[in-house]
Image (cartoon, rainbow, N blue to C red):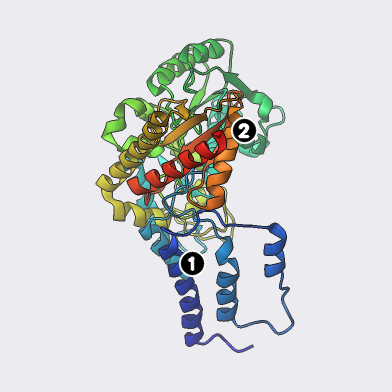
Amino acid sequence: MDAMRPTDWKRVVDAASAAALEHLESLPDRPVLPAAADHEAILSLLDRPPGPAGIDAAQVVGELASDLRPYITAQAGGRYFGFVVGGLHPAALGAEFLVSAWDQNAPMFAATPGVAVAEELAARWFVDLVGLPPQSSVGFVTGGQMATFTCLAAARHELLREVGWDVEARGLPGAPPLTVVAKTGVHATVPRALRLLGLGEQALIRVGCDDEDRMRPDLLEEALAAIEGPTVVVVESGNVNTGSFDDFEAVADIVDAHRAAGNPTWVHVDGAIMLLAAAAPSMADKVAGLDRLDSWSTDGHKLLNVAYDCGIAICRNAAAHRAAMSVTAAYLEQDTCARDPLDWGPDFSRRARGVQVYATLRSLGRDGVIELVERTTSLARRFADALSASGYAEIVNDVVSNQVLVRWQSPDGDNGRLTDAIMAGVRAEGTAFFTGTTYRGERLMRISVSDWATDEDDVDRAVEALLRHARLNIR
């Protein structure tokens, strides 16, 4: 086979960039959710097994773009309010293009010095931006799940080390028990991380919450009083349903007393949704005490609006973080002076995902990040105010960040049926995308405002569609 000529690269890049630009420019007007996204139809369209001779790369890219165009969800548009999914900042997109073109397998400085330093700076800038201890270590991983896993692995290492057990060398059989305390509303990624770490979900003790799904400090104190030995406490900066923040100062005080009683303890913060709130002075009362804790995880592809995939794991105790994650081999060229990315996450081969964080932080600047936090919170309140004033809906939560919980009020009392009908109608017409949740046994609608591109017009268009479908379904 002939080597690819330089002109072939241009044809492939042109085909991809033209399709990408067409998609991005269509976002303000295209349906948010693809219409008639039938699994069998998509499968039959794409199921073209490789033939003996192969096909020109530019042709493949062009056909792929054309075939999938009708079935691509506009997650990067301003009217995607489902789950907690950010958009795509232009600087992140540009960095992603470069990272893919550079094709850097980036576990070590020796192999890819440029992107390794870009990630090092992105880590330093992010820690400073959210006001965490400057000595904290950072790993860029695939998402919030692996960020939580990484931080809890560091906690497992350190807590067992303090009681004389080398878990990396000896494993968990025979190890002193490690207890994990979290609230009843803990995100599903936490028990999943416990399974992956070999601790098991039975290590988890759940304590009750208040009406906003904030951990109750009195119940945490009561739970810790019954625990002896290594302990992990998991709290949240931005609850997946209510957007609330746990009382970090109270948690830190209670944990200090637990430690003083002879119990090695580590507090992890699941900040997938709103760790970035710590950058905004207006949110200072919500995040007070955050810097007193031990590790923090977040999703860069939520509020920071970098491309998938990018999670961020941060640990105050860099030695514990590195001990839990690092790997050595005779053939590697690990640098003792520069930061090697493989020391801070579970990946060996890895893309240079921290480069897009570098680019996005530079592009936004500190004021831009603050504005992003405050604007998404303000737009969430705009949703809440408009829906509450309509008479068709009630707002269940105190809107303190970018999450809104909505109860649609059906005259026949079947609020859950009405909720699903309204969401289905708005999705089908393509105006916006919302997802539901079962919160304390009740079917509700969730609104997550996480996209840098969302503006007042997007919110107002979505509200109009919601209320129109409410009227249609209440008749």
Residue 169 position in % (x across, y down): 64, 38
Give the SS element for disc 2.
Answer: helix
Q: Nearer the viewer, residue 435 or 61?
A: 435
Secondary element type, mark 1: helix
Observer able to see residue 67: yes
Dividing the picture into quadrants, the one containing residue 167 is top right
Q: CA distance from mark 1 to mark 2?
A: 45 Å
Horizontal arrangement in the rendering, residue 102 relative to residue 54 (left or right): left
Q: Which residue is mark 2?
A: 417
Is residue 113 visible in this depiction of the protein?
Answer: no
Amino acid at circle 2: Arg
Q: Are marks 1 and 2 in contact (CB under 8 Å)?
A: no
Q: Position of residue 431 (x, y in %)?
A: 48, 51
Nearer to the camera, 87 or 459: 459
* Quadrant the N terminus occupies: bottom right
- Which residue is drawn at the image coordinates 58% and 44% (left, top)? 424
Residue topped by disc 1:
100
Report whether 208 appears left or right of 22: right
Where 301 falls versus 249 (above or below)? below
Residue 7, numbered label: none
In this rendering, the answer to whether 309 lies above or below 238 is below
Binning the other alpha carbons within 10 Å of mark 2 as few (below 14), some (14 to 19) or many (20 upward) gives some
> Dividing the picture into quarters, in which one does residue 315 lie?
top left
Q: Position of residue 369 (x, y in %)?
A: 31, 45
Which residue is at 29% across, 37% downward?
Answer: 280
